[in-house]
Structure formats: C-alpha cells, structure tokens
Image (tube, rainbow, N blue to C red):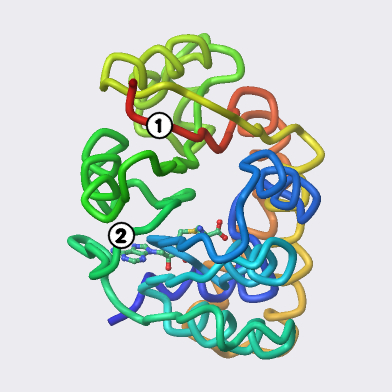
Amino acid sequence: MDIPRIFNITESAHRIHNPFTPEKLATLGAALRLETGTRLLDLGSGSGEMLCTWARDYGVIGTGIDMSQLFSEQAKLRAEELGVADHVTFIHGDAIDFVSDEKVGVAACLGATWIGGGVAGTIELLAQSLRPGGIILIGEPYWRQLPPTEDVARGCLAGSIADFVLLPEFLASFSHLGYDVVEMIVADQDSWDRYEAAKWLTMRRWLKANPDNEFAQEVRARLTTEPERYAAYTREYLGWGVFALMTRC
Ligand code: SAH
C-alpha cells in the first residue's frame, strides 16, 4: 500500500507536506493553547512534523496514520531525533475509516480531506474520535482570489472553480455544519514557496541521481514547467489554511 510514487519523489525532502513553514506550525500549536498530555490524532500525518514538534514543544501524545511508507518511516525517525518516540506512534496505513480507541482532545486532517470524501465527511470521521469539547483541525485550500476562468482553476491543479470557495464562504460552511471556527492560521505566498519551490531542488537532485529511472521523463517535464505554472496560478489564486473547529455550544 502506498501513494503515487511521484509524491514520494518530489516531497522526499519535505518535513511539512503543505504550504506551511515550521513557524506557522508552531504558531498553530501555540494558538490552540494545548495542555501537556493532550491526545492528538492525525489522519494523513505525512512525515509527522506536527505530532513530533508539538510533542516536544507542548507535551502532546499522539497517533498519526499515513499511507506513504516513506513518509511514515521519516516520521518515526523524526520522533527519535526529537526525543519524543515514546509520545507519538506512526501507523503506515489507510486512514479512510480510522477511529481511535481512546478519545482525543485534538483530531486533525491537514491537506488530506479526500480521506473522508471531502471536508464534511472528514469532519464526521474525525468527530468519532473526539472527546466532548475537543478540537478538530482541518487543513484545506480555498480561493485567495476567484479564478476568472476554468483554465486558471485547472492551472492551480483544481478540477474546476467549483472545487473551492473564497475564505468567508469557507468559514461559513463550517458554521453550516454546526461548528464554531475557533482559530485559523493561513498560508501566505512565502510559505507556499517553501512547499512548492522546495520540490524543484529535490527534483533536480533526484534527476541527476536517477537519469534512467522510469519516472525520469515525468520529473524532467515537471521541473521544466512547474516554476512558471506555480507562479502564474497557484501562488496567485490558491489559499490554504488550517481551521480549528469546536461543536457549537
Ligand atoms: N498532514 C501532513 C501531510 C499532508 S500531504 C502534513 O501536513 O505534512 C497528504 C498526506 O496524506 C500524504 O502524506 C499522503 O501519504 C497521505 N494520504 C493520502 N491518502 C491517504 C489515506 N487514504 N490514508 C492515510 N494517508 C493518506
């Protein structure tokens, strides 16, 4: 079981597989005012940076599930590196219907809401693991500016304009689901660059090391076109943020 190989190539050097910097991740942790010993569940935990750094900085205890074998291994190594291996557990697997045995104070899915079939489904899935009064974290794109045409939306690698909404509408959608939005941290163009531009050096080095690999042509094509595509579309039009939700009281 694994994710498409191309992601394991282009994001092999990423610790955060989203347009967030380590500073934004730390700001999010601080914003949530986490108490030592808070339990956290992370669906699509990637290389485990959120769980590992929050275990180190805020004393959380947590479990992450991710379908990428490479990222899951990297997460375990990171936990050892930060001295938190006894606080966090990383499971390599499909999180599609994962519900934790013990209820958690924070249930998160950052940049992987297809796991629950979209934002609403993922909130429903996470809610099954949440203790009363707990916080759900959803990391998801929205339109920073509405694309003027469907071609521009596709340039952002969205299927269509209808895939995302503007930020006010997105925040309202959580309210319609019965949740209060209690915090948010959003990406900016610099943090987008850390996610996207970091892939280019990784691809360049990978190509040099793997010229005869079956993916070499695909990686070559991406490296040639990605900087311009990203600057023209994603960087201008796509927002991304993490939204903290609590059931309305
Ligand atoms: N939340 C992490 C990773 C986001 S990238 C971070 O912010 O760094 C999306 C992640 O979802 C990838 O690590 C990918 O391997 C994982 N993923 C994709 N489908 C999945 C599934 N069905 N179950 C678990 N993880 C999945």
Q: Earlier in the sequence, mark 1 or mark 2?
A: 2
Q: Nearer the viewer, residue 22 or 197?
A: 22
Q: Which mark is residue 103?
A: 2
For the point 21% across and 61% down, the residue is 96
Question: Which x, y percent locates residue 162?
Answer: 33, 19
Residue 49 badge: none
* Amino acid type of the residue that numbered disc 1 sits on in the rendered structure: Met
Asked if labels 2 and 1 touch by Cβ distance under 8 angstroms, the answer is: no
Disc 1 Cβ-to-ligand 1 distance below 8 Å: no
Residue 56 sits above or below residue 235 on the image: below
Quadrant of the frame with the C terminus? top left
Q: Residues within 10 Å of mark 2 (few under 14, many from 20)?
A: some
Indicate whether 5 appears above or below 180. below
The location of residue 199, given as percent across then percent down, is 69, 62
Residue type (three-letter) at the residue carrying disc 2: Lys
Identify the residue shown where x is 57% and y is 77%: 216
Secondary structure type for disc 1: strand
Q: Nearer the viewer, residue 236 or 26?
A: 26
| Residue under label 1 | 246
Residue extending farthest to the left is 97
Where's the N terminus, which quadrant? bottom left
Q: Which of 9 and 183 lies nearest the eye of the viewer?
A: 183
Q: Secondary structure at mark 2?
A: loop
Q: Position of residue 37 (x, y in %)?
A: 55, 66
Residue 7 on image: x %, y % = 50, 67
Foreground of the two, 171 or 11: 171
Question: At x 38% / y 81%, what residue is drawn?
Answer: 91
Query: Looking at the image, in which quadrant does ligand 1 appear?
Result: bottom left
Residue drawn at point x = 43 percent, y = 32 percent: 245
As measured in the structure, the alpha-carbon distance from the residue carrying label 1 to the one carrying label 2 is 15 Å
Q: Quadrant of residue 229?
A: top right
